[in-house]
Structure formats: structure tokens, C-alpha cells
Image (spheres, helix red, strand yellow):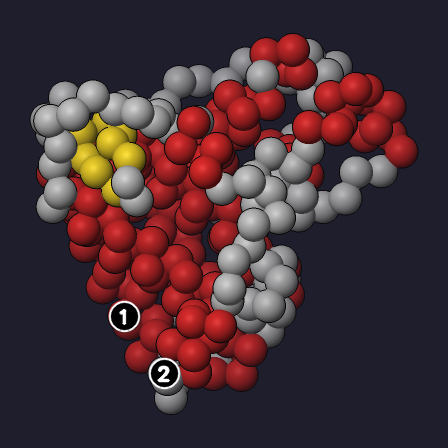
């Protein structure tokens, strides 16, 4: 089965980021304090620590847009993820400690997340006015639009992580899912595109190792199955 042709990055990437972050806010607002201890798809991280992880990603976005660069980009929205191989989950103790410092996460952590995520989306909107803007982050230079795409992927994948034990939570923004799938297409390579027969959400979950491959998947993917997961 041939995978659907995916569009290029959205013209208004900042708006997509704002919706992606807004959907995460919809997931966590209204949760009880106890819900922040619910499990996620990220080993070692409950809902609270994973939201802290996302919060620091939004903070990094603010720092990046305040750190313009004149250098040529050395990463794009696909190659950025080469520095984050599958299985490299890192030490989660820091975000766990930070999450535990919020005595009422349903109020304080959610408020902090909302403030930072909304500020990051506004910074992206301003930063993308300059079509040639480049930013520096984590030792690399990216075009601003490519950088925003990486933020969308992070928010979307972790949105799916957050809701595994929250059955009534909203799904990620559809355009954010497409940006994530487009990124995975780039990591997977064109030789595999014609064999992907999953819907977009399943593709994201299986291509990032959130869901295991079954026998039908292995038959569908053939030799390409060994390339999964594409990122952690």
C-alpha cells in the first residue's frame, strides 16, 4: 500500500506550533493533582515530569529565538534528529525532581506550562516574519522554520505519550501530526515510502517505537523494518 503524499511544511508553522501546544494544554488542564502521577509512554516519566520536559522545550524555544545566527544552517528539520538516536532517553531524574517541586501541579505546573508555551508560540510567530532568519540551538544552526518544525514534532510525539492513560484526552492537532509524519518520512528515506500502510497516528507511534511492530507490519515493511524506530 502506497503511503499518502504528505504536504510540505505548513506556511504558518508558528500557528501550527501554537495549536500543538494548545492541544497539550487541553490535555493537562482539568486534571487532578493525582493525574500527574499517571504513566506515559516515556519510561520513567509520569504525566508531571513529561510536562516539565515539554516546558523546558518551550523555554529553549524562547532562548533560540533570542539567539539569531548569521552562519549557514548545519541541520534542517529532519537531520536535527540525527543527534537523538532511538533508545537515548537520557536521565529523567532532573524533570522528576522539578515536577515534584510543584505542590499543586494541576494549578502551578499547568499555569507555568501555559505561560511558557504561549510565549514560545508568539516568539515563533515574530521570528518567522523574517523568512531568512536562522537560530542557534544545542550547538547547531537551523533556519527558523525548520526549528519550529522540530518543536512541533516534540510536542506532537509527547502529546501521544501523555494521553496513553488519559482516555478522554484530545488527540494532537492534525496538521502537527502531518509535520511529524513528514519528518519521519525524511528519516525513513524514499525507499520505504511505498510500503507504509498505517494511518498517520499509528505511523508516528510505530515509527518512534511507541507501539511494537506485529507480524503484519514486518511483512509490510520487509527489510525496511530494521530501520525502526527512527527516533526516541
Residue 207 position within the rendered picture, expressed as x and y whole percent measured from the top left? 64, 35
Question: Dot 2 lies on which element?
Answer: loop
Residue 64 position within the rendered picture, expressed as x and y whole percent measured from the top left? 20, 45
At horizontal 51% and vertical 46% (from top left) the residue drawn is 157
The N terminus sits in image quarter: top right
Position of 53 compared to 47: left or right?
A: left
In the image, residue 108 sits, relative to residue 221, either above or below, namely below
Which of the pair 121/188 is nearer the observer? Answer: 188
In the image, residue 8 sits, relative to residue 23, either above or below, namely above
Q: Which mark is residue 102?
A: 2
Does the residue at mark 1 contact the one at mark 2 (Cβ under 8 Å)? yes
Judge the density around disc 2: few (<14), some (14-19), many (≥20) Cα neighbours within 10 Å: some
Residue situated furthest front in the rendering:
139
Q: Earlier in the sequence, mark 1 or mark 2?
A: 2
Question: Dot 1 lies on which element?
Answer: helix
Which of the pair 168/209 is nearer the observer? Answer: 209
Residue 27 position within the rendered picture, expressed as x and y whole percent measured from the top left? 46, 62
The C terminus sits in image quarter: top right
Position of 209 compared to 104: left or right?
A: right
Q: Is residue 189 visible?
A: yes
Judge the density around disc 1: few (<14), some (14-19), many (≥20) Cα neighbours within 10 Å: few
Residue 228 position within the rendered picture, expressed as x and y whole percent measured from the top left? 68, 33
At horizontal 48% and vertical 33% (from top left) the residue drawn is 82
At horizontal 25% and vertical 31% (from top left) the residue drawn is 141
Q: Which mark is residue 112?
A: 1
Residue situated furthest bottom in the rendering:
103
Cα separation, mark 1 vs mark 2, equals 10 Å
At horizontal 72% and vertical 46% (from top left) the residue drawn is 211
Position of 66 compared to 44: left or right?
A: left
Q: Quadrant of residue 165?
A: bottom right
Amino acid at each position: 500500500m502506497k503511503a499518502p503524499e504528505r504536504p510540505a511544511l505548513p506556511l504558518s508553522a508558528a500557528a501550527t506550533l501554537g495549536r500543538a501546544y494548545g492541544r497539550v494544554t487541553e490535555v493537562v488542564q482539568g486534571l487532578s493533582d493525582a493525574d500527574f502521577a499517571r504513566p506515559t509512554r516515556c519510561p520513567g516519566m509520569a504525566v508531571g515530569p513529561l510536562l516539565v520536559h515539554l516546558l523546558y522545550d518551550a523555554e529553549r524555544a524562547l532562548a533560540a529565538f533570542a539567539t539569531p545566527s548569521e552562519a549557514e544552517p548545519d541541520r534542517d528539520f529532519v537531520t536535527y534528529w540525527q543527534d537523538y538516536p532511538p533508545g537515548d532517553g537520557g536521565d529523567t531524574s532532573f524533570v522528576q525532581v522539578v515536577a515534584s517541586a510543584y505542590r499543586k501541579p494541576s494549578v502551578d505546573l499547568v499555569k507555568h506550562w501555559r505561560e511558557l508555551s504561549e510565549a514560545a508560540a508568539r516568539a515563533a510567530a515574530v521570528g518567522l516574519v523574517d523568512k531568512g532568519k536562522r537560530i542557534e540551538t544545542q550547538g547547531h544552526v537551523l533556519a527558523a522554520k525548520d526549528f519550529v518544525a522540530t518543536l512541533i514534532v516534540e510536542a506532537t510525539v509527547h502529546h501521544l505519550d501523555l494521553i496513553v492513560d488519559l482516555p478522554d484526552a484530545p488527540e494532537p492537532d492534525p496538521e502537527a501530526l502531518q509535520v511529524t509524519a513528514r519528518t519521519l518520512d525524511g528519516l525513513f528515506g524514499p525507499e520505504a515510502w511505498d510500503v507504509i500502510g498505517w494511518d498517520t497516528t499509528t505511523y508516528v507511534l510505530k515509527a518512534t517505537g511507541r507501539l511494537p511492530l506485529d507480524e503484519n507490519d514486518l511483512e509490510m515493511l520487509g527489510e525496511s523494518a530494521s530501520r525502526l524506530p527512527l527516533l526516541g
